Image (spheres, helix red, strand yellow):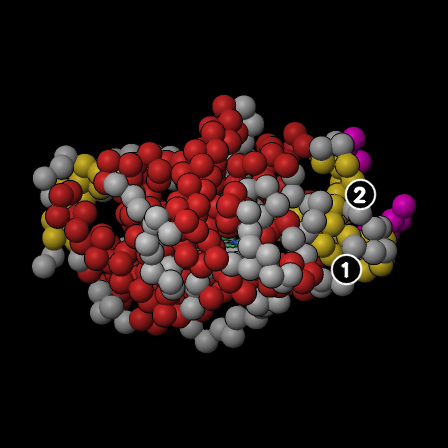
Protein backbone atom coordinates (compact mmCIF):
# COMPACT_ATOMS: atom_id res chain seq x y z
CA UNK A 1 0.00 0.00 0.00
CA UNK A 2 1.37 3.43 -0.98
CA UNK A 3 0.31 5.64 1.89
CA UNK A 4 1.92 8.82 0.55
CA UNK A 5 0.51 8.48 -2.95
CA UNK A 6 -3.04 9.62 -3.72
CA UNK A 7 -5.29 6.71 -4.51
CA UNK A 8 -8.50 7.07 -6.45
CA UNK A 9 -10.96 5.35 -4.15
CA UNK A 10 -13.39 4.40 -6.93
CA UNK A 11 -13.48 0.62 -7.28
CA UNK A 12 -12.72 0.74 -10.99
CA UNK A 13 -12.17 3.82 -13.11
CA UNK A 14 -12.65 2.33 -16.58
CA UNK A 15 -15.93 4.22 -17.02
CA UNK A 16 -14.39 7.50 -15.80
CA UNK A 17 -11.52 7.01 -18.25
CA UNK A 18 -14.01 6.58 -21.07
CA UNK A 19 -15.99 9.60 -19.87
CA UNK A 20 -13.04 11.93 -19.40
CA UNK A 21 -10.83 10.73 -22.27
CA UNK A 22 -7.76 12.90 -22.81
CA UNK A 23 -8.33 14.70 -19.48
CA UNK A 24 -8.64 11.63 -17.23
CA UNK A 25 -5.07 11.70 -15.88
CA UNK A 26 -4.64 15.51 -15.93
CA UNK A 27 -7.91 16.05 -14.00
CA UNK A 28 -6.68 13.84 -11.17
CA UNK A 29 -3.14 15.20 -11.16
CA UNK A 30 -4.69 18.65 -10.64
CA UNK A 31 -7.17 17.44 -8.06
CA UNK A 32 -4.56 15.60 -5.97
CA UNK A 33 -1.80 18.15 -6.66
CA UNK A 34 0.46 15.20 -7.33
CA UNK A 35 2.28 14.01 -10.47
CA UNK A 36 1.40 10.47 -9.58
CA UNK A 37 -1.66 8.61 -8.33
CA UNK A 38 -3.00 5.09 -8.16
CA UNK A 39 -6.23 3.87 -9.63
CA UNK A 40 -7.90 0.77 -11.08
CA UNK A 41 -8.63 0.36 -14.78
CA UNK A 42 -10.05 -2.79 -16.39
CA UNK A 43 -9.91 -4.49 -13.01
CA UNK A 44 -6.21 -3.95 -12.44
CA UNK A 45 -4.17 -1.52 -10.38
CA UNK A 46 -2.57 1.21 -12.48
CA UNK A 47 -0.13 3.96 -11.54
CA UNK A 48 -0.86 7.09 -13.59
CA UNK A 49 1.70 9.85 -13.91
CA UNK A 50 2.42 13.02 -15.86
CA UNK A 51 4.98 15.80 -16.24
CA UNK A 52 8.58 15.80 -17.45
CA UNK A 53 10.11 14.05 -14.41
CA UNK A 54 7.58 11.24 -14.79
CA UNK A 55 8.33 11.04 -18.52
CA UNK A 56 12.03 10.68 -17.77
CA UNK A 57 11.30 7.85 -15.36
CA UNK A 58 8.96 6.14 -17.84
CA UNK A 59 11.71 5.91 -20.45
CA UNK A 60 14.17 4.23 -18.07
CA UNK A 61 14.44 0.79 -19.64
CA UNK A 62 15.93 -0.70 -16.45
CA UNK A 63 12.64 0.08 -14.71
CA UNK A 64 9.98 -0.45 -17.38
CA UNK A 65 9.19 -2.85 -20.18
CA UNK A 66 6.63 -2.83 -22.95
CA UNK A 67 6.09 -6.58 -23.21
CA UNK A 68 2.72 -7.37 -21.64
CA UNK A 69 1.70 -3.70 -21.47
CA UNK A 70 -0.29 -3.42 -24.69
CA UNK A 71 -3.80 -4.89 -24.60
CA UNK A 72 -4.45 -7.58 -27.22
CA UNK A 73 -7.41 -5.56 -28.54
CA UNK A 74 -5.00 -2.71 -29.34
CA UNK A 75 -2.50 -5.08 -30.93
CA UNK A 76 -5.27 -6.54 -33.10
CA UNK A 77 -6.26 -3.11 -34.42
CA UNK A 78 -3.65 -0.38 -34.08
CA UNK A 79 -0.19 -1.97 -33.84
CA UNK A 80 -0.38 -5.58 -35.04
CA UNK A 81 0.30 -8.56 -32.78
CA UNK A 82 3.88 -8.70 -31.43
CA UNK A 83 4.89 -5.55 -33.30
CA UNK A 84 7.85 -3.35 -32.32
CA UNK A 85 5.70 -1.47 -29.75
CA UNK A 86 5.55 -4.65 -27.63
CA UNK A 87 9.24 -5.54 -27.72
CA UNK A 88 12.14 -4.74 -25.39
CA UNK A 89 15.92 -4.96 -25.12
CA UNK A 90 17.98 -6.35 -27.99
CA UNK A 91 14.97 -7.33 -30.10
CA UNK A 92 13.57 -3.83 -29.86
CA UNK A 93 16.88 -2.09 -30.42
CA UNK A 94 17.70 -4.10 -33.55
CA UNK A 95 14.24 -3.65 -35.04
CA UNK A 96 14.17 0.05 -34.21
CA UNK A 97 17.25 0.72 -36.32
CA UNK A 98 15.34 -0.46 -39.41
CA UNK A 99 12.55 2.03 -38.77
CA UNK A 100 15.06 4.80 -38.19
CA UNK A 101 16.91 3.91 -41.42
CA UNK A 102 13.63 4.49 -43.28
CA UNK A 103 12.99 7.85 -41.60
CA UNK A 104 16.32 9.67 -42.20
CA UNK A 105 16.30 13.37 -43.19
CA UNK A 106 16.63 12.23 -46.83
CA UNK A 107 13.41 10.21 -46.60
CA UNK A 108 11.68 12.97 -44.61
CA UNK A 109 12.44 15.50 -47.35
CA UNK A 110 11.42 13.10 -50.11
CA UNK A 111 8.11 12.36 -48.41
CA UNK A 112 7.41 16.07 -47.88
CA UNK A 113 8.10 16.79 -51.57
CA UNK A 114 5.85 13.96 -52.67
CA UNK A 115 3.12 15.24 -50.37
CA UNK A 116 3.33 18.79 -51.76
CA UNK A 117 3.23 17.48 -55.36
CA UNK A 118 0.27 15.27 -54.55
CA UNK A 119 -1.61 18.13 -52.87
CA UNK A 120 -1.10 20.30 -55.96
CA UNK A 121 -2.28 17.50 -58.28
CA UNK A 122 -5.39 16.86 -56.17
CA UNK A 123 -6.26 20.52 -55.81
CA UNK A 124 -6.53 20.88 -59.61
CA UNK A 125 -9.62 18.67 -59.35
CA UNK A 126 -11.04 20.48 -56.31
CA UNK A 127 -11.62 23.70 -58.28
CA UNK A 128 -14.48 21.96 -60.08
CA UNK A 129 -16.10 20.57 -56.95
CA UNK A 130 -18.74 22.10 -54.72
CA UNK A 131 -16.78 21.31 -51.60
CA UNK A 132 -14.17 18.94 -50.23
CA UNK A 133 -13.54 17.54 -46.75
CA UNK A 134 -9.90 18.08 -45.90
CA UNK A 135 -9.53 15.03 -43.64
CA UNK A 136 -10.90 12.75 -46.41
CA UNK A 137 -8.54 14.30 -48.97
CA UNK A 138 -5.56 14.12 -46.59
CA UNK A 139 -6.15 10.40 -46.00
CA UNK A 140 -6.08 9.67 -49.72
CA UNK A 141 -3.16 12.00 -50.42
CA UNK A 142 -1.01 10.48 -47.70
CA UNK A 143 -2.00 6.93 -48.60
CA UNK A 144 -0.98 7.46 -52.23
CA UNK A 145 2.31 9.05 -51.17
CA UNK A 146 3.16 6.54 -48.42
CA UNK A 147 2.51 3.53 -50.69
CA UNK A 148 4.39 5.02 -53.64
CA UNK A 149 7.36 5.93 -51.42
CA UNK A 150 7.33 2.49 -49.74
CA UNK A 151 7.30 0.64 -53.09
CA UNK A 152 3.80 -0.72 -52.47
CA UNK A 153 1.67 -0.91 -55.62
CA UNK A 154 -1.66 0.84 -55.19
CA UNK A 155 -4.18 1.26 -57.98
CA UNK A 156 -6.08 4.53 -58.02
CA UNK A 157 -9.33 2.57 -57.68
CA UNK A 158 -8.11 1.13 -54.33
CA UNK A 159 -6.90 4.37 -52.76
CA UNK A 160 -10.03 5.29 -50.80
CA UNK A 161 -10.61 1.81 -49.41
CA UNK A 162 -6.97 1.32 -48.36
CA UNK A 163 -6.77 4.80 -46.83
CA UNK A 164 -9.97 4.15 -44.88
CA UNK A 165 -8.53 0.89 -43.59
CA UNK A 166 -5.33 2.54 -42.30
CA UNK A 167 -7.41 5.21 -40.56
CA UNK A 168 -9.87 2.66 -39.12
CA UNK A 169 -6.95 0.94 -37.37
CA UNK A 170 -6.02 4.26 -35.72
CA UNK A 171 -9.58 5.24 -34.79
CA UNK A 172 -10.20 1.83 -33.20
CA UNK A 173 -7.82 2.81 -30.37
CA UNK A 174 -10.30 3.89 -27.71
CA UNK A 175 -13.30 2.27 -29.36
CA UNK A 176 -15.57 -0.55 -28.32
CA UNK A 177 -18.21 -2.33 -30.41
CA UNK A 178 -18.57 -1.69 -34.15
CA UNK A 179 -15.71 0.84 -34.41
CA UNK A 180 -13.35 -1.67 -32.79
CA UNK A 181 -14.45 -4.45 -35.14
CA UNK A 182 -14.12 -2.15 -38.11
CA UNK A 183 -10.49 -1.63 -37.07
CA UNK A 184 -9.91 -5.36 -36.76
CA UNK A 185 -11.33 -6.11 -40.18
CA UNK A 186 -9.33 -3.24 -41.67
CA UNK A 187 -6.15 -4.68 -40.16
CA UNK A 188 -6.87 -8.19 -41.47
CA UNK A 189 -7.42 -6.84 -44.99
CA UNK A 190 -4.27 -4.71 -44.88
CA UNK A 191 -2.11 -7.51 -43.44
CA UNK A 192 -3.25 -9.96 -46.16
CA UNK A 193 -2.62 -7.40 -48.88
CA UNK A 194 0.87 -6.40 -47.68
CA UNK A 195 1.87 -9.96 -46.77
CA UNK A 196 1.24 -11.15 -50.32
CA UNK A 197 3.47 -8.33 -51.57
CA UNK A 198 6.24 -9.33 -49.13
CA UNK A 199 6.00 -12.90 -50.43
CA UNK A 200 6.20 -11.70 -54.06
CA UNK A 201 9.32 -9.67 -53.31
CA UNK A 202 10.92 -12.72 -51.70
CA UNK A 203 9.99 -14.94 -54.67
CA UNK A 204 11.37 -12.30 -57.03
CA UNK A 205 8.05 -11.88 -58.84
CA UNK A 206 7.72 -8.32 -57.52
CA UNK A 207 10.63 -6.04 -58.45
CA UNK A 208 11.15 -3.14 -56.07
CA UNK A 209 13.92 -0.65 -55.28
CA UNK A 210 16.38 -1.96 -52.69
CA UNK A 211 16.15 1.20 -50.58
CA UNK A 212 12.35 1.02 -50.41
CA UNK A 213 10.48 0.25 -47.21
CA UNK A 214 8.85 -2.80 -48.85
CA UNK A 215 12.22 -4.33 -49.79
CA UNK A 216 13.73 -3.37 -46.41
CA UNK A 217 11.01 -5.16 -44.39
CA UNK A 218 10.93 -8.14 -46.80
CA UNK A 219 14.65 -8.74 -46.33
CA UNK A 220 15.17 -7.59 -42.71
CA UNK A 221 17.07 -10.06 -40.52
CA UNK A 222 16.68 -9.87 -36.77
CA UNK A 223 19.48 -9.86 -34.18
CA UNK A 224 19.86 -13.61 -34.62
CA UNK A 225 20.01 -13.43 -38.41
CA UNK A 226 16.46 -14.71 -38.98
CA UNK A 227 14.09 -13.13 -41.48
CA UNK A 228 10.66 -12.06 -40.27
CA UNK A 229 7.91 -14.49 -41.15
CA UNK A 230 5.96 -12.78 -43.97
CA UNK A 231 3.09 -11.90 -41.65
CA UNK A 232 5.41 -10.10 -39.20
CA UNK A 233 7.11 -8.30 -42.09
CA UNK A 234 3.66 -7.11 -43.20
CA UNK A 235 2.85 -5.91 -39.67
CA UNK A 236 6.03 -3.84 -39.47
CA UNK A 237 5.62 -2.40 -42.97
CA UNK A 238 2.11 -1.35 -41.96
CA UNK A 239 3.75 0.24 -38.90
CA UNK A 240 5.46 2.59 -41.35
CA UNK A 241 2.62 3.27 -43.80
CA UNK A 242 -0.32 3.56 -41.34
CA UNK A 243 1.18 6.35 -39.21
CA UNK A 244 2.12 8.34 -42.32
CA UNK A 245 -1.57 8.19 -43.34
CA UNK A 246 -2.51 9.16 -39.78
CA UNK A 247 -0.73 12.50 -40.16
CA UNK A 248 -4.08 13.51 -41.76
CA UNK A 249 -5.43 14.10 -38.26
CA UNK A 250 -2.71 16.65 -37.48
CA UNK A 251 -3.20 18.23 -40.94
CA UNK A 252 -6.91 18.70 -40.20
CA UNK A 253 -6.03 20.31 -36.87
CA UNK A 254 -3.50 22.51 -38.69
CA UNK A 255 -6.32 23.84 -40.91
CA UNK A 256 -8.47 24.44 -37.84
CA UNK A 257 -5.63 26.33 -36.14
CA UNK A 258 -5.26 28.54 -39.24
CA UNK A 259 -8.97 29.28 -39.22
CA UNK A 260 -9.06 30.07 -35.51
CA UNK A 261 -5.87 32.15 -35.61
CA UNK A 262 -5.99 33.96 -38.96
CA UNK A 263 -3.40 36.48 -37.79
CA UNK A 264 -0.72 33.86 -38.54
CA UNK A 265 -1.69 33.62 -42.22
CA UNK A 266 0.19 36.81 -43.13
CA UNK A 267 3.29 35.65 -41.25
CA UNK A 268 3.19 32.22 -42.89
CA UNK A 269 2.82 33.67 -46.39
CA UNK A 270 6.55 34.37 -46.43
CA UNK A 271 7.08 30.59 -46.38
CA UNK A 272 9.81 31.13 -43.77
CA UNK A 273 10.71 27.62 -42.53
CA UNK A 274 11.06 28.78 -38.91
CA UNK A 275 7.54 30.24 -38.86
CA UNK A 276 6.12 27.08 -40.42
CA UNK A 277 8.04 25.04 -37.89
CA UNK A 278 6.80 26.97 -34.82
CA UNK A 279 3.21 26.79 -36.05
CA UNK A 280 3.17 23.03 -36.59
CA UNK A 281 5.02 22.37 -33.31
CA UNK A 282 2.26 24.25 -31.54
CA UNK A 283 -0.34 22.20 -33.43
CA UNK A 284 1.39 19.02 -32.19
CA UNK A 285 1.43 20.37 -28.62
CA UNK A 286 -1.98 21.98 -28.38
CA UNK A 287 -4.29 19.55 -30.18
CA UNK A 288 -5.02 16.05 -28.87
CA UNK A 289 -3.88 12.93 -30.71
CA UNK A 290 -1.97 10.23 -28.76
CA UNK A 291 -3.52 10.29 -25.24
CA UNK A 292 -1.21 8.32 -22.92
CA UNK A 293 1.26 5.43 -23.05
CA UNK A 294 1.45 2.21 -21.08
CA UNK A 295 4.38 0.18 -19.73
CA UNK A 296 4.91 -2.52 -17.11
CA UNK A 297 7.21 -2.28 -14.11
CA UNK A 298 10.23 -4.52 -14.74
CA UNK A 299 11.41 -4.83 -11.13
CA UNK A 300 10.40 -3.29 -7.78
CA UNK A 301 11.55 0.26 -7.05
CA UNK A 302 10.39 3.36 -5.20
CA UNK A 303 9.90 6.81 -6.75
CA UNK A 304 8.39 9.81 -4.97
CA UNK A 305 7.35 7.55 -2.08
CA UNK A 306 5.45 5.32 -4.45
CA UNK A 307 6.25 1.62 -4.53
CA UNK A 308 6.32 0.39 -8.11
CA UNK A 309 5.89 -3.37 -7.95
CA UNK A 310 7.08 -5.74 -10.66
CA UNK A 311 4.36 -6.36 -13.25
CA UNK A 312 2.27 -3.26 -12.38
CA UNK A 313 0.80 -1.27 -15.23
CA UNK A 314 1.85 2.38 -15.50
CA UNK A 315 0.35 5.11 -17.71
CA UNK A 316 2.26 8.20 -18.80
CA UNK A 317 0.05 11.17 -19.69
CA UNK A 318 1.00 12.58 -23.11
CA UNK A 319 -1.78 15.11 -23.59
CA UNK A 320 -1.49 16.35 -20.00
CA UNK A 321 2.30 16.70 -20.12
CA UNK A 322 1.94 18.82 -23.26
CA UNK A 323 -0.48 21.03 -21.28
CA UNK A 324 1.43 21.06 -17.99
CA UNK A 325 1.47 24.67 -16.68
CA UNK A 326 4.90 24.08 -15.12
CA UNK A 327 6.29 23.44 -18.61
CA UNK A 328 4.10 25.71 -20.73
CA UNK A 329 2.87 29.24 -19.95
CA UNK A 330 -0.88 29.47 -20.55
CA UNK A 331 -0.91 25.90 -21.86
CA UNK A 332 -4.50 26.12 -23.06
CA UNK A 333 -3.70 28.95 -25.45
CA UNK A 334 -2.47 28.43 -28.99
CA UNK A 335 0.75 30.38 -29.19
CA UNK A 336 3.40 29.23 -31.75
CA UNK A 337 5.91 31.88 -30.59
CA UNK A 338 6.48 29.83 -27.44
CA UNK A 339 8.75 27.66 -29.59
CA UNK A 340 10.90 30.59 -30.77
CA UNK A 341 13.78 30.40 -28.34
CA UNK A 342 12.73 27.29 -26.55
CA UNK A 343 15.26 24.56 -26.10
CA UNK A 344 12.91 21.59 -26.29
CA UNK A 345 14.05 18.85 -23.94
CA UNK A 346 13.51 15.13 -24.54
CA UNK A 347 10.87 14.82 -21.81
CA UNK A 348 8.85 18.08 -21.83
CA UNK A 349 7.31 18.01 -25.31
CA UNK A 350 6.08 14.50 -25.99
CA UNK A 351 3.31 14.35 -28.63
CA UNK A 352 5.11 11.35 -30.15
CA UNK A 353 6.72 9.99 -27.01
CA UNK A 354 9.83 11.08 -25.09
CA UNK A 355 13.51 10.25 -24.73
CA UNK A 356 15.80 9.17 -27.53
CA UNK A 357 14.18 7.37 -30.48
CA UNK A 358 17.30 5.32 -31.20
CA UNK A 359 17.51 3.78 -27.74
CA UNK A 360 13.90 3.85 -26.54
CA UNK A 361 10.36 3.65 -27.88
CA UNK A 362 10.02 7.29 -28.94
CA UNK A 363 8.38 7.57 -32.36
CA UNK A 364 10.88 7.22 -35.23
CA UNK A 365 8.52 9.16 -37.50
CA UNK A 366 8.65 12.52 -35.74
CA UNK A 367 10.89 14.21 -38.31
CA UNK A 368 8.67 12.88 -41.10
CA UNK A 369 5.52 14.08 -39.34
CA UNK A 370 7.02 17.56 -38.97
CA UNK A 371 8.16 17.81 -42.60
CA UNK A 372 4.86 16.49 -43.98
CA UNK A 373 2.90 18.90 -41.77
CA UNK A 374 5.08 21.83 -42.84
CA UNK A 375 4.55 21.00 -46.52
CA UNK A 376 0.81 20.73 -45.94
CA UNK A 377 0.66 24.03 -44.03
CA UNK A 378 2.64 25.72 -46.81
CA UNK A 379 0.16 24.27 -49.33
CA UNK A 380 -2.88 25.51 -47.40
CA UNK A 381 -1.47 29.02 -46.96
CA UNK A 382 0.48 29.61 -50.15
CA UNK A 383 -0.85 27.39 -52.94
CA UNK A 384 -4.64 27.63 -52.71
CA UNK A 385 -7.44 29.92 -51.65
CA UNK A 386 -10.71 28.67 -50.21
CA UNK A 387 -13.77 29.55 -48.17
CA UNK A 388 -14.77 27.81 -44.97
CA UNK A 389 -18.55 27.35 -44.85
CA UNK A 390 -20.49 27.12 -41.58
CA UNK A 391 -19.89 23.66 -40.10
CA UNK A 392 -19.31 21.88 -36.80
CA UNK A 393 -15.58 22.20 -36.15
CA UNK A 394 -15.76 21.25 -32.50
CA UNK A 395 -13.70 18.31 -31.35
CA UNK A 396 -14.31 16.06 -28.40
CA UNK A 397 -11.72 15.51 -25.68
CA UNK A 398 -13.59 12.36 -24.73
CA UNK A 399 -13.28 10.41 -27.98
CA UNK A 400 -9.81 8.90 -28.38
CA UNK A 401 -8.48 9.66 -30.97
CA UNK A 402 -10.48 12.76 -31.79
CA UNK A 403 -11.01 15.00 -34.83
CA UNK A 404 -12.99 18.14 -35.74
CA UNK A 405 -16.54 16.83 -36.27
CA UNK A 406 -16.94 18.00 -39.87
CA UNK A 407 -13.46 16.89 -40.95
CA UNK A 408 -12.94 20.52 -42.15
CA UNK A 409 -15.08 21.36 -45.16
CA UNK A 410 -13.59 23.73 -47.77
CA UNK A 411 -15.46 25.54 -50.60
CA UNK A 412 -14.77 27.77 -53.61
CA UNK A 413 -11.26 26.46 -53.94
CA UNK A 414 -8.94 28.18 -56.39
CA UNK A 415 -5.25 27.76 -57.14
CA UNK A 416 -2.88 30.62 -56.40
CA UNK A 417 -0.45 29.81 -59.23
C1 LIG B 1 5.69 5.20 -31.79
C2 LIG B 1 2.83 9.06 -32.14
C3 LIG B 1 3.83 9.37 -36.86
C4 LIG B 1 6.12 5.14 -36.61
C5 LIG B 1 4.91 6.27 -31.48
C6 LIG B 1 4.48 6.62 -30.16
C7 LIG B 1 3.68 7.69 -30.26
C8 LIG B 1 3.61 8.05 -31.64
C9 LIG B 1 2.96 8.41 -29.11
C10 LIG B 1 4.78 5.82 -28.88
C11 LIG B 1 6.08 6.20 -28.24
C12 LIG B 1 6.39 5.26 -27.08
O1 LIG B 1 5.83 4.16 -27.03
O2 LIG B 1 7.17 5.61 -26.20
C13 LIG B 1 2.80 9.41 -33.47
C14 LIG B 1 1.98 10.48 -34.00
C15 LIG B 1 2.27 10.57 -35.32
C16 LIG B 1 3.25 9.55 -35.63
C17 LIG B 1 1.00 11.33 -33.19
C18 LIG B 1 1.68 11.52 -36.33
C19 LIG B 1 0.61 11.18 -36.95
C20 LIG B 1 4.63 8.32 -37.18
C21 LIG B 1 5.22 8.10 -38.47
C22 LIG B 1 5.85 6.91 -38.42
C23 LIG B 1 5.68 6.37 -37.08
C24 LIG B 1 5.12 9.06 -39.67
C25 LIG B 1 6.59 6.28 -39.56
C26 LIG B 1 7.63 5.56 -39.45
C27 LIG B 1 6.12 4.76 -35.30
C28 LIG B 1 6.67 3.50 -34.81
C29 LIG B 1 6.56 3.53 -33.42
C30 LIG B 1 5.95 4.80 -33.08
C31 LIG B 1 7.25 2.38 -35.66
C32 LIG B 1 7.01 2.46 -32.43
C33 LIG B 1 8.39 2.82 -31.92
C34 LIG B 1 8.93 1.90 -30.87
O3 LIG B 1 8.15 1.15 -30.26
O4 LIG B 1 10.16 1.92 -30.66
N1 LIG B 1 4.38 7.17 -32.37
N2 LIG B 1 3.53 8.87 -34.48
N3 LIG B 1 4.94 7.26 -36.36
N4 LIG B 1 5.69 5.51 -34.23
FE1 LIG B 1 4.74 7.25 -34.35
Residue 214 located within the stretch drawn in magenta: no
The residue under the point 33% across, 56% down is 208
The residue under the point 58% across, 38% down is 74
Residue denoted by label 2 = 7
Residue denoted by label 1 = 63
Q: Which residues are magenta?
A: 1-11
Q: Which mark is residue 136?
A: none
Q: Nearer the viewer, residue 73 or 321?
A: 73
Left or right: 15, with 205 as reference point:
right
Q: Secondary structure at mark 2?
A: loop
Foreground tag (2 vs 1): 1
**Residue 139 image position (x, y, % from top left):** 33, 43
Q: In which quadrant will I find the C terminus?
A: bottom left
Badge 1: residue crowd in 10 Å (few <14, some 14–19, many ≥20): some
**Residue 109 image position (x, y, % from top left):** 33, 67
Image height check: is 169 above or below 144?
above
Viewer can see residue 246:
no
Amino acid sequence: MNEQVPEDKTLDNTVALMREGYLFIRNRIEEYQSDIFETHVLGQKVICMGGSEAAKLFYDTDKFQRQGAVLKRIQKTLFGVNAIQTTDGRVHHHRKQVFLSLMTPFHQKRLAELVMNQWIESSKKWVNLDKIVLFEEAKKTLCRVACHWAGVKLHESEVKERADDFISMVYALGAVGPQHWKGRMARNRAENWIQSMIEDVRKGTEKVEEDSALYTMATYQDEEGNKFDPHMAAIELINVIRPIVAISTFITFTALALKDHPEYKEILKSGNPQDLDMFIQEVRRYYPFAPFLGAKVKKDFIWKDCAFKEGMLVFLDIYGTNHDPRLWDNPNEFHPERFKDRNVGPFDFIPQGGGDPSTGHRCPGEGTTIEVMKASLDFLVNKIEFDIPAQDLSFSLVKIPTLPESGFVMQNISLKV
